[in-house]
Amino acid sequence: MPAYIVVQIDVKDPHAYEEYKALAPPSIEAYGGRYIVRGGEVETLEGSWSPTRLVILEFPDRARARAWWESTEYDAAKALRQRAAATEMILVEGLPGERRL
């Protein structure tokens, strides 16, 4: 069953965050992940949630998503992101393939 990492990002250091954006993709791909959303315009339809930057990653399953987040391949990029931005991040299971439209 696919799993998704959803990240709300408030970039504090744009230069360092650009470095992060170059470092992170190879580690994501190494764990079978891919970007579903990477920045882009956000429009609030209901409520007060209005992230300035939103990223959604898809992985084959929770185990692969967690393995990526804990991986040595992601360590340097993660440390850079944590210095360059304030983030809120969740891991959520998706629907099995036969239940998705």
Image: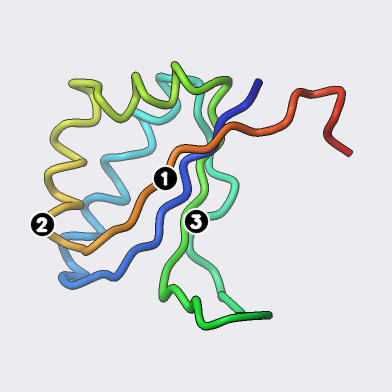
SS for callout 1? strand
Q: Is residue 15 above or below residue 7?
A: below
**Display coloring:** rainbow
Residue type (three-letter) at the residue carrying disc 1: Ile
Report the mark closest to the observer, 1 or 2.
1
Q: Does label 1 or label 3 sit earlier along the sequence?
A: 3
Q: Is residue 37 above or below residue 40?
A: above
In the rendered image, residue 97, in percent from the top left (x then y), is placed at 79, 24
Give the residue drawn at x 65%, y 33%.
94
In the rendered image, residue 65, in percent from the top left (x then y), is placed at 43, 26
Q: In the displayed image of the protein, which residue is found farthest to the front?
A: 47
In the rendered image, residue 50, in percent from the top left (x then y), is placed at 48, 78
User: Which residue matches tag 1?
Assistant: 90
SS for callout 3? strand
Q: CA distance from mark 2 to mark 3?
A: 19 Å
Residue type (three-letter) at the residue carrying disc 2: Arg
Give the residue drawn at x 85%, y 29%.
99
Query: Exactly how many numbered labels are in the figure?
Result: 3
Q: Quadrant of the N terminus?
A: top right
SS for callout 2? helix
